[in-house]
Image (cartoon, rainbow, N blue to C red):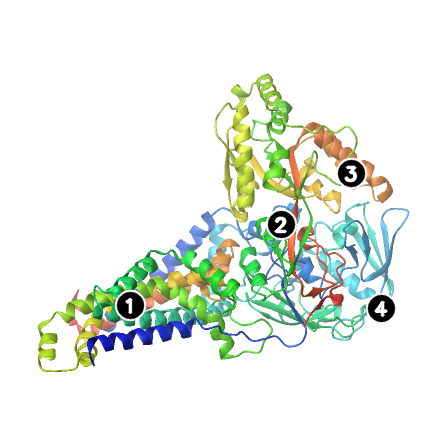
C-alpha cells in the first residue's frame, strides 16, 4: 500500500511539474507581455522606459532562466509579486480570493438546489397541468439563456431600474462590515448564477419523480392509505433525489465556470475576477499561481480518490 | 394531505422563497459627506496602481492625495504652480528654480526642498522602477538652496521637461528613504500607508473593490468639504454607468453612446472635453506598400471624414489634417484632403497600386474595442474598397496589439488605427514620429523616417520659450500635412457624467487623467 501511495504521489508531482511547464510555455506564446499590457498605446512612453521596466521584472531573461527562477522561488513558497496589483505578494492575494468565490458559488448552489428541487416536485405532482407547463417552459428558458444575457439583464432590471439591490461589488465602499450588507450584494449575482443550474435540477427532479411515482411500491403505499404528502415526501422524493444528487455533484464545475463570468459582471472580488484581470494584463505571476493551485487541488483530489479506492479495493493495488 | 394541497403548499413555499430572494435589500449607507466615483474608469484611469512613479495614467485620482511641483490649469492651456508657488527658467534654458509652498505631509512633517531632491533623484533612477527615468534623463543635478528653494539643472534644453514634471508627484523623503531602492516599486507602503500633501489622505484599499480617502484637515487650501472620497473600481465603463444610474456613485467616465443616454436627464450633468488624442491611420513604413506618397494621399482622399464625424461621432470630433487641432499649432495653407474618391483612384493609378498591392487584403489592426470604433472602421473599410484598397479590420486587446506593433513582423501590421496623445504639450507626438525614436531606441512603432519631419521635431523640442514654440510646432504640422507619415483623422471628444448631487466638482477628460487643477477640496455633495 505504501509503495502504491508513493508511486501515485510521485506521478502527481510529475503532473504538477508538467502543468507548470505547460502554463509557463503557453503564457509566453500569447502575444504581448505584462509591459505591453501596462501601457496605453495612446500614451507617449519611451521605449527606454519600457525596457527598464521589462528588465526590472526579469522579462528580458531567456525563458528557461525565467522558468527555473520562478520554480525555485515557488518551491520555497514564494510565488512572486503581482504586476497588476502594485507589487502585492501573489500567494496571499490568490488565497484571499478563494473565499468570495466559494461564498458566491455555494450560495448559488443552495438557491438552485432549493428552487430546483421544489419546483421539480411541484411540476411532477401537477403533471401536464398549467403549473407544470409554465415551470417546464421557464426551465427551458433558464437552461437556454446565456449567462452573459441573464447577468446583464438582471443587473439592469434589479439594480438600475428597480434599485432593489446594489449594482455590483461585495460590500458598500466605506461602510462598516455587516452581514446584511454582504447579503444585499450577494443575492443578485447568486440568484442569477443559480438560474441555469436550478433549471437543470428542476428538469431532472421532475422526470425522476415522475418515474418513481409510477413504481409499484408507491401504488402500494397509496393503497395502504398513506396520506399523499407522506407518499411523496417519504417514499417518492427520497428515491427520486438519488440521480439529482449525482447531477448536483457532477455539475459543480459548471457553477465554477458561471461564477467566473458573474464575478466579472458584478465586480465580485473572487478568483474569476482576479484571473480575468490577470490574463487581460498578462500578470504572469498571478496566472501561474492561480492555475497551479487549481491544478494542485485537482491532482490532490484525484490522488486521494485513487488512494481511497486502493484502500477499499485490493485489486487496484495489483493493477 | 391531498395531492392538490401538497402542490399548493409547495407552490406557496417556492413563491415565498423567490419573493424573499427578490425583496429590496438595502445596502449600508456611508457616514458623513461621502463622494463615491469611478475615478479610474476609462482611458485616463489606472485601477490598482498606487505608485505615481509607475503610473502611465490615473493622475486624476493620484492628485487627490499626491501633488506635483507644477500642474496644468483646468483648461489644460498652461502649466501653473502646485507645490511650487513659483518657478522660473534661467537664460541658459537649462536652470529651473522652484520656490516651494509652505505645507505639511499628511503625517504632519514639513514638505521641503529635500523632498523635491529625493523625489526627482528617485524618479530618474530606473532601479526604483520609475517609468520617468528616461524622460528625466536630462536632469544633471538637483540642488537645495534652502528649505523652500530647489534648483534643477538640465544637461540640454528640453521643451517637454515641465510637462513631464507635472506627472512627477512629490514623495516624502522621511517615509520612503528607508526603503531599499530596488524594493521601492513593490513596497506595500503605496497601498497601505502612503502620505502626500493633497487635500485627502489615504485610509484603505480593498483589493479590486475601492480606495477610501478621508479629508485632510490641515490642507493648505482649507479643509475639504467632503468628509470622505471613495474611488470605486469597475471591470468596465458600462458597469460604472450602471452604478451611476443606480445612485451608488456620483461620477464616472462614460463611453460616448452611454453619455448620450443621459442627455435631457436633469439628475445628471454630462462633461464633454477634448480627448487630446489624435486618431490616425498608421502606415507601417517598413511594410513596403505605403512608400509612395500618392498612395498615402489616396487613402486620405478616399475617406469621407466629415460624414463619419457627423454620423458616427454625432459631430463630437474635430477633423485633424496633421497631428494637431489646437488653432495656435495650425499654420495656414494646410491641405484639407476633402473627400474625393475619383482623385484617390487617379492617385492610386499613377502610383501603380495594382502592382504594389492591388486588391490583396491588408490587415488593419486596432486596440480600440468599442462599438463606435468598430463602426468607424467598417465605414472606412467600405470607403477604401471603393477606390481599390482592401483593408480588413482586426480588433485586438492592448497587450496583443503592443506585442505585434513593437515586433519586426511587418506583414502582421501593415496598417493600424490608433491614437497618440497630442497635447496639452505638443511634444507628445515626438515619440511616435521622430526617426530617432524608431524601436528599439524609441516608440515610433510605424517606423516613420522622414528627415524634414524629424528636423522640425528636433527644432521644436529644443525650443523652451513658449512664445517661440508655437511657430516651431506649426512647422511640424506642416510637414505632417504634406508628407502624411500617418493619415490623420480626428480628435474625438470624451465624456464624464456627474450626478446632480455633486457641487463644485471639476473634471476634464485629460490624457492619462492629467493631472490638472481640479480643487478636490471644494468638491461637495448635497445630502
- Number of the front mark, 4 or 2: 4
Instruction: Give me the chain letter of mark 3.
Output: B
Residue at mark 1 to residue at mark 3: CA–CA distance: 67 Å
Relative horizontal placement of residue B298, taking residue B426 as reference (left or right): left
SS type, badge 4: loop
Residue B131 lies, with reference to residue A256, above or below; the image says: above
Please state which of residues B110 and B237 is positioned toward the viewer in this rendering. Answer: B237
- Where is residue B348 shown, x and y percent of the image? 58, 21
Q: Do labels 1 and 3 share a chain?
A: no
Instruction: Give me the chain letter of mark 1.
Output: A
- Label 3 packing within 10 angstroms: few (<14), some (14-19), many (20+): many
In the drawing, what numbered circle is on residue B329?
Answer: 3
Instruction: Answer yes or no: is residue A289 visible.
Output: no
SS type, badge 2: helix
Tell me the residue that label 4 is attached to: B102
SS type, badge 3: helix
Residue at mark 4 to residue at mark 1: CA–CA distance: 66 Å
Residue at mark 2 to residue at mark 3: CA–CA distance: 29 Å
Tell me the residue that label 1 is attached to: A248
SS type, badge 1: helix
- Where is residue B138 shown, x and y percent of the image? 77, 49
Residue A192 lies, with reference to residue B439, above or below; the image says: below
Please state which of residues B487 and A208 is positioned toward the viewer in this rendering. Answer: A208
Tell me the residue that label 2 is attached to: A50
Amino acid at each position: 500500500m505504501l509503495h502504491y501511495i508513493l508511486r501515485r504521489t510521485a506521478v502527481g508531482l510529475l503532473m504538477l511539474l508538467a502543468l507548470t511547464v505547460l502554463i509557463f510555455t503557453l503564457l509566453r506564446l500569447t502575444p504581448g507581455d505584462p509591459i505591453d499590457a501596462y501601457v496605453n498605446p495612446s500614451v507617449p512612453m519611451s521605449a527606454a522606459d519600457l525596457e527598464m521596466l521589462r528588465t526590472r521584472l526579469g522579462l528580458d531573461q531567456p525563458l528557461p532562466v525565467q522558468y527555473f527562477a520562478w520554480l525555485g522561488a515557488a518551491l520555497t513558497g514564494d510565488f512572486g509579486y503581482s504586476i497588476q496589483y502594485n507589487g502585492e505578494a501573489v500567494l496571499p492575494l490568490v488565497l484571499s480570493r478563494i473565499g468570495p468565490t466559494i461564498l458566491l458559488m455555494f450560495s448559488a448552489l443552495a438557491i438552485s438546489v432549493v428552487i430546483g428541487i421544489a419546483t421539480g416536485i411541484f411540476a411532477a405532482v401537477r403533471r401536464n397541468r398549467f403549473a407544470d407547463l409554465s415551470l417546464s417552459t421557464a426551465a427551458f428558458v433558464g437552461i437556454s439563456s446565456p449567462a452573459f444575457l441573464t447577468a446583464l439583464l438582471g443587473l439592469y432590471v434589479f439594480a438600475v431600474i428597480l434599485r432593489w439591490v446594489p449594482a455590483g461589488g461585495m460590500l458598500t465602499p466605506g461602510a462598516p462590515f455587516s452581514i446584511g450588507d454582504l447579503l444585499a450584494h450577494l443575492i443578485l449575482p447568486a440568484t442569477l448564477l443559480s438560474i441555469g443550474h436550478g433549471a437543470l435540477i428542476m428538469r431532472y427532479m421532475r422526470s425522476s419523480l415522475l418515474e418513481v411515482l409510477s413504481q409499484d411500491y408507491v401504488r402500494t403505499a397509496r393503497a395502504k392509505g398513506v396520506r399523499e404528502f407522506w407518499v411523496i415526501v417519504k417514499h417518492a422524493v427520497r428515491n427520486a433525489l438519488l440521480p439529482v444528487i449525482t447531477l448536483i455533484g457532477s455539475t459543480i464545475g459548471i457553477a465554477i465556470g458561471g461564477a467566473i463570468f458573474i464575478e466579472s459582471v458584478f465586480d465580485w472580488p473572487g478568483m474569476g475576477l482576479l484571473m480575468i484581470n490577470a490574463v487581460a494584463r498578462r500578470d504572469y505571476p498571478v496566472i501561474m499561481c492561480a492555475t497551479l493551485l487549481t491544478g494542485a487541488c485537482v491532482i490532490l483530489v484525484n490522488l486521494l480518490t485513487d488512494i481511497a479506492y486502493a484502500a477499499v479495493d485490493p485489486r487496484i493495488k495489483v493493477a | 394531505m391531498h395531492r392538490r394541497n401538497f402542490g399548493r403548499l409547495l407552490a406557496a413555499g417556492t413563491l415565498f422563497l423567490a419573493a424573499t430572494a427578490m425583496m429590496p435589500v438595502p445596502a449600508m449607507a456611508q457616514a458623513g459627506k461621502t463622494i463615491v466615483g469611478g475615478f479610474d474608469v476609462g482611458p485616463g484611469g489606472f485601477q490598482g496602481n498606487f505608485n505615481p512613479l509607475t503610473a502611465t495614467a490615473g493622475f486624476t485620482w493620484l492628485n487627490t492625495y499626491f501633488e506635483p511641483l507644477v500642474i496644468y490649469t483646468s483648461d489644460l492651456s498652461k502649466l501653473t504652480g502646485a507645490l511650487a508657488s513659483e518657478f522660473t527658467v534661467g537664460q541658459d534654458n537649462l536652470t529651473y528654480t522652484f520656490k516651494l509652498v509652505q505645507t505639511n505631509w499628511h503625517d504632519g512633517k514639513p514638505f521641503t526642498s529635500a523632498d523635491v531632491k529625493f523625489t526627482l533623484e528617485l524618479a530618474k533612477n530606473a532601479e526604483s522602477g520609475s517609468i520617468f527615468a528616461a524622460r528625466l534623463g536630462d536632469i544633471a543635478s538637483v540642488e537645495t538652496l534652502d528649505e523652500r528653494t530647489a534648483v534643477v539643472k538640465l544637461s540640454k534644453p528640453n521643451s517637454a521637461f515641465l510637462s513631464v514634471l507635472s506627472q512627477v508627484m512629490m514623495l516624502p523623503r522621511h517615509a520612503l528613504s528607508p526603503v531599499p531602492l530596488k524594493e521601492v516599486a513593490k513596497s506595500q507602503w503605496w497601498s497601505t500607508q502612503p502620505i502626500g500633501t493633497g487635500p485627502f489622505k489615504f485610509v484603505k484599499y480593498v483589493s479590486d473593490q475601492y480606495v477610501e480617502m478621508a479629508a485632510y484637515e490641515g490642507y493648505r487650501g482649507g479643509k475639504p468639504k467632503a468628509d470622505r472620497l471613495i474611488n470605486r473600481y469597475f471591470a468596465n465603463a458600462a458597469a460604472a454607468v450602471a452604478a451611476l444610474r443606480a445612485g451608488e456613485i456620483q461620477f464616472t467616465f462614460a463611453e460616448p453612446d452611454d453619455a448620450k443616454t443621459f442627455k435631457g436627464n436633469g439628475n445628471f450633468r454630462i462633461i464633454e472635453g477634448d480627448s487630446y488624442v489624435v486618431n490616425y491611420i498608421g502606415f507601417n513604413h517598413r511594410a513596403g506598400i505605403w512608400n509612395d506618397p500618392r498612395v498615402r494621399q489616396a487613402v486620405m482622399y478616399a475617406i469621407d471624414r466629415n460624414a463619419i464625424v457627423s454620423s458616427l461621432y454625432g459631430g463630437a470630433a474635430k477633423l485633424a489634417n496633421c497631428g494637431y487641432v489646437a488653432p495656435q499649432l495650425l499654420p495656414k495653407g494646410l491641405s484639407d484632403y476633402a473627400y474625393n474618391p475619383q482623385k484617390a483612384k487617379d492617385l492610386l493609378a499613377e502610383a501603380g497600386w495594382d502592382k504594389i498591392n492591388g486588391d490583396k487584403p491588408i490587415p488593419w489592426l486596432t486596440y480600440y474595442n468599442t462599438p463606435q470604433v468598430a463602426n468607424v472602421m467598417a465605414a472606412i473599410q467600405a470607403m477604401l474598397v471603393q477606390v481599390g484598397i482592401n483593408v480588413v479590420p482586426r480588433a485586438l486587446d492592448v497587450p496583443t496589439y503592443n506585442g505585434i506593433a513593437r515586433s519586426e513582423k511587418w506583414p502582421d501590421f501593415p496598417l493600424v488605427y490608433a491614437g497618440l496623445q497630442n497635447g496639452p504639450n505638443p511634444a507628445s507626438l515626438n515619440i511616435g514620429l521622430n526617426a530617432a525614436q524608431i524601436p528599439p531606441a524609441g516608440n515610433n512603432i510605424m517606423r516613420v523616417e522622414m528627415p524634414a519631419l524629424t528636423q522640425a521635431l528636433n527644432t521644436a523640442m529644443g525650443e523652451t520659450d513658449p512664445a517661440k514654440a508655437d511657430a516651431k510646432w506649426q512647422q511640424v504640422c506642416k510637414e505632417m500635412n504634406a508628407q502624411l507619415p500617418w493619415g490623420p483623422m480626428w480628435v474625438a471628444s470624451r465624456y464624464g457624467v456627474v450626478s446632480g448631487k455633486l457641487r463644485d466638482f471639476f473634471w476634464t477628460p485629460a490624457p492619462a487623467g492629467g493631472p490638472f487643477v481640479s480643487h478636490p477640496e471644494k468638491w461637495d455633495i448635497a445630502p
